[in-house]
Amino acid sequence: MKLTGVLGHAPNSRVRRTATRLCSLQSWKRRLPVTIWLPKYTFEFLLRDIIAGITVGLTSIPQGIAYAMVAGLPPQVGLYSSIFPGLVYSIFGSCKDVTVGPTAILSALLAKYVAKSADFAYLASFLSGCIIMLLGILQLGFLLDFISKPVICGFTTAAALQISASQLRSLFRIAGSSGGTFIDAIINFFTHITTIHLWDSVLGISTIIALILLKRAVIPVSETSSICRTQLAKSWQYVVRARNALVVFVCAIVAFILKTKGLTPFALTGTIQGGLPNFSPPPFSTEVLNKTLDFEDMLTVYGPEGLVMPLVAILESIAIAKAFAGATSVDGTQEMIAIGACNIVSSFAQSMPATGSFTRTAINHASGVTTPAGSFFKACLVLLAVTLLADAFYFIPRATLAGIIMVAMFSIIELTIVKRLWRNSKIELVVYALTVVMGACVGLEYGILVGVCADILRALAHTARPNIHTSMFKRPPAILRMSSDQRVGGLSTLRSPRCGLHFRTRLLQRPAVLRQIWPAHCHFSWLILRAMSVTLILSRITSFVILSARETTSITRSIARFATLN
């Protein structure tokens, strides 16, 4: 049998080619996308980006305040986290639709560290940015592909449940604590259910109803509709997209009027520090309970669970970018560099970790944004608000912010996957359910960790028990190349694994292979393994099969020759 091989390129030429690619002008332009789209920028693009930026900014203001409160941070921190990442992303971002800022999931992950000191939030932003950028520079984004869809959906569902439950305290203005897991929040709610405040409850529930109705309200138009009705429908779309800001504005006006009459039926946001933050390096030491913690102590507080924050930030941003990219390919490496840069820069401005937001990205996309400059205009609007309107934010009711967060969480719970997994893969449904239960009951970081481990075990179990198709021949197939003077007699068999045979799982796979390849009653002269789905080099394939053959004495006597087809 003639064996042929393909030699790879020499290491020196490979290094030279890589260096040339990295140092080329086109490569540097890819790392600074602003240099690609800015020279082609037009006045029409400017108008559309300004409209999109204003629309998204009106949503970013209430959500930024709300997510800062979820993390236990001062409200202005959420606004800072919308400003500086937006400015940086407009330079390094490669996806026009993505809007970077604080998100509910990152806020929930951050809350337990902020309970000790707000400095943990600013340092988490810096460390997350460094980790994400390093992964991007090393082009390790492919590692995220190993986190399956059921794990991601299970994690986001658990996060939505936990965040929604944590807002019950503000929505109904009950006593007790809103921290901890989903179970803790539910227990706290029923323990203090007698302390519910009527008017906060009415306002919070009214906020939820108003947001849902505004989202579904449309003005129907057809080809026969008048121009006036068509324009009215288009204008109404912008009202719908700015519904969060509209509801906050109305509720704040009501609270202000009642305050002037000496009435305060609602719990209000309170004083928000206006102006720009104090620019300084992120804190590498802090004080907790009159005890000074250095950088090493702070890393100990984060623990291994702290790595979940940059992981979630990458997953959220790249998943959102792919969802809105359409036919355009997403440069995962550049997105990781951009998100890393956003967090590193914003950590010098008292900001919490930021990543792509699904809600605000959807609004940005629907508003017709044309370039990442939309993020720049969004950041400018939030900057104007925090410097000029900080005093007005005092009157925003906490129940309104809680209602906004809960409605946002409803949109990220994906229940359709349960039906799909039940129909197609019940074992993956178990992985999904395990991620949800662990995330909601124990903690989000443990939920994603257990989900990933369970998914790896599922994949290994499937690989360790391959389904092998068998074909028997009087002579080896013609595809097997042999010299003209070679004569073959006896029975041959062709085996085709329908899943990969992996070298690292060979000890688990051998029993399955032995059961299916070498039945006790079968004697043959040739074994031909169709290696199209075998992920081993030839020597390891041969070693794998022959070592397996030696485990059965009858096989050792019957097997005469072995060949692989690839």
Image: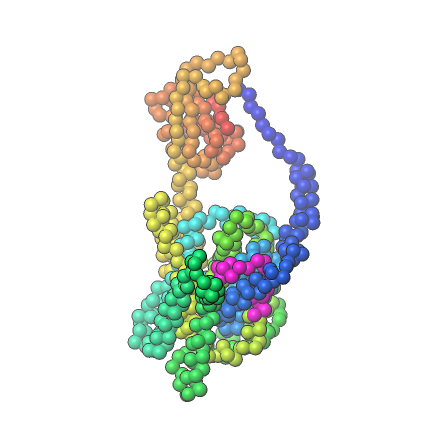
Where residue 117 sits in the image (x, y, percent)? 51, 71
Relative height, residue 523 to residue 319 (above, below): above
Residue lying at 63% horizontally and 51% vertically, measured from the top left: 30
Where residue 275 sits in the image (x, y, percent)? 58, 76
Residue lying at 57% horizontally and 58% vertically, measured from the top left: 370
Q: Is residue 7 visible?
A: yes
> Is residue 515 highlighted in magenta?
no
Residue projecting furthest to the bottom = 262
Q: How is colour applied across the structure in the image?
A: rainbow
Residue lying at 38% horizontally and 51% vertically, measured from the top left: 417
Residue lying at 38% horizontally and 81% vertically, measured from the top left: 265
Instruction: Magenta stretch: give its range.
Output: 362-381
Left-right relation of 316 to 441? right
Left-right relation of 260 to 9? left
> In terms of image quadrants, where is residue 549?
top left
> Is residue 370 highlighted in magenta?
yes
Where residue 80 sits in the image (x, y, percent)? 55, 69
Where residue 331 sits in the image (x, y, percent)? 57, 50
> In terms of image quadrants, where is residue 266?
bottom left
